[in-house]
Amino acid sequence: MPWHARLDLNYQRDEPRARSIARFSHDGPLRILQSLYPEGDAVCHNVLIHPPGGLVGGDTLQIDVRAARGSHGLITTPGASRFYRSEGERAVQRTRLVLEGGTRLEWLPLEAICYSACRAENHLRIEPAPGAELIGWDVVALGLPNASQPFEHGSLLQHIEVPGVWLERGRIDAADTRLMNSPLGLAGQRCLASLFFVAGSPIDRGRREAALEAARGIVGASGLRASAGVTSPHAEIIVLRVLAPVVEPAMQLLRQVWSAWRATLWQMEAKAPRIWAM
C-alpha cells in the first residue's frame, strides 16, 4: 500500500530569549527529532526522518517549512533518501520552503539515491520574502556504482524553483545514452549536486562577488575542479553546480563551500549538525 505522508514545520523566534523554536505537525511517516542548539539559542537544528527509509511507486511525501521573521532554522536528514524500483507509478517528494523577511534557513538533506527502474519526481520550491536568505543544497545519486548497482532503467524529474526568479527543471532518463554519457550531458558521471544561496532581495554586489570568489577558490583546489562551477544567474541567486562519479567527493565540496558562504555572507562559523559525524 502506498505511503502518503505530510510534514508541516514552523520556525518562530521567541523574543524574550532571542531563541529560534520549531513546532511541527505530521500525517504519516514523517517526523522531526528533538531540536538541538549547538550554536546557541539563535539557530535551531532539526533532523527530518522518514522511518520507511525510501519511496516506491505511488508514495508521496509533502514537506512544508515556514520560517517566521527573525528565526533561523537548519534542517538535515540522518541518511540518504531513496527512490526504489517502480512497477509503473511515480514516487513523488515535494518540498516547499517559505521564508518571511529577516529570516535565515538552511536546507541540507543528505543525497537522494535513484535506484535502477525507479520513476521519481523531486520538487523543491523556495519562496523568500524581501530580506530573507537561504543556503541549501540538492544532491542526487543515480544508482550505486560502488555496489555494482548501475542506473540502467527508470527516470528522475528534478525541479528546483524560486518563483519568478529561478527555475531548474529536467528529466533524466536512463535510456537516454547521449544525456547520460555524452560530454555535453553527464559525461558518465552519476552524482549531480547543487548548492545555492537564495535571497528575497538583490544581493549586494560586494557580498555576491565575495561569495563567488570564496567558492571558486575552493573549487579550484578540489579534485572536481573540471566538473564544478559557480555562477550568479540572477541578482538574488548564487549557485554551485557539481558533477562527480559518486556522492562523497561532491558532498565534501558542498560542505566546504557551505562553510565558506556562512562565514562570508553571514559572518557565522559553520557548525556541522551532530548527525553528520555519526
Image (tube, rainbow, N blue to C red):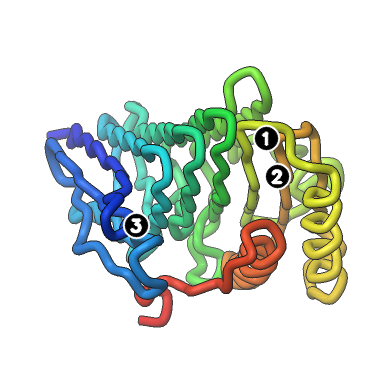
Please name the residue that numbered disc 2 is placed on: 180
Q: Is residue 129 left or right of residue 238?
A: left
Percent x, y of residue 91: 34, 34
Q: Is residue 135 left or right of residue 123?
A: right
* Front residue of this view, candidates 192 and 107: 107
Outermost residue toward the top in this view: 164
Percent x, y of residue 229: 82, 54
Tag 2 secondary structure: helix
Please name the residue that numbered disc 3 is placed on: 18
Residue at image position (57%, 33%) is 160
Quadrant the C terminus occupies: bottom left
Please name the residue that numbered disc 1 is placed on: 176
Q: Is residue 161 left or right of residue 23?
A: right
Tag 3–tag 2 contact (CB < 8 Å)? no
Tag 1–tag 2 contact (CB < 8 Å)? yes
Amino acid carrying mark 2 in the image: Met
